Image: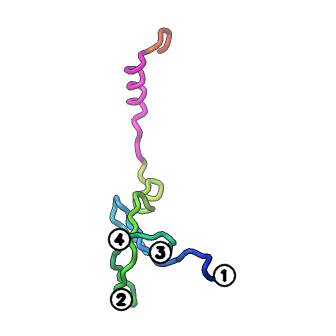
Amino acid sequence: MKTGIHPDYHPVVFQDANTGAAFLTRSTITSSRATEWVTPEGVHTYPLVVVEVSADSHPFWTGTQRHTDSAGQIEKFHRRYGRRAGSR
């Protein structure tokens, strides 16, 4: 690789804002926050990035479905705009 043209690729801790689960990976992202992470070599300080959704809280990976109240949305539409003559 050419030197001086690639971004700094370093270890970063990502933390899920909903569940608090954290994982250590490598990234080019930077952060002003830091956290301590226990490794087999000892405790190290890494940049901390808080994310809204990760595999720990995403409905697809957790197997939970979010239920949308479609019947309620239809009733809300009818209340707002009224029913047309000749419709159900």
Residue marked by disc 1: 2
* Separation (CA) of disc 1 from disc 2: 32 Å
Per the rendered image, the range of residues in magenta is: 66-82
How crowded pointer 2 is (Cα within 10 Å; few <14, some 14-19, many 20+) is rated as few
Q: Mark 3: few, some, or many residues within 10 Å (few <14, many ≥20)? A: few
Magenta-span inclusion, residue 73: yes
In the drawing, what numbered circle is on residue 25? 3
* First in residue order: circle 1 vs circle 2: 1
Q: Which of pointers 3 and 2 lies earlier in the amino acid sequence?
A: 3
On the image, the x and y values in percent for residue 73 come to 41, 30
81 vs 3, nearest the viewer: 3
Lower position in the chain sequence, tag 3 or tag 1: 1
Badge 1 local density, few (<14 within 10 Å), some, or many (20+)?
few
Residue 21 % position (x, y): 36, 67
Residue drawn at x 60%, y 76% is 6
- Disc 3/disc 1 C-alpha distance (Å): 24 Å
Work out whether mark 4 precedes mark 3 in sequence or the reverse, and give the earlier one: 3
Q: Nearer the viewer, residue 1 or 19?
A: 1
Q: CA distance from mark 4 to mark 3?
A: 16 Å
Relative vertical location of residue 41 with respect to residue 30 in this rendering, above or below: below
Q: Which residue is mark 2?
A: 42
Residue at the front extreme? Answer: 4
In this rendering, the answer to whether 69 lies above or below 85 is: below
At label 3, the amino acid type is: Thr
Q: Nearer the viewer, mark 4 or mark 1?
A: 1
Amino acid type shown at disc 1? Lys
The residue to which callout 4 is attached is 33
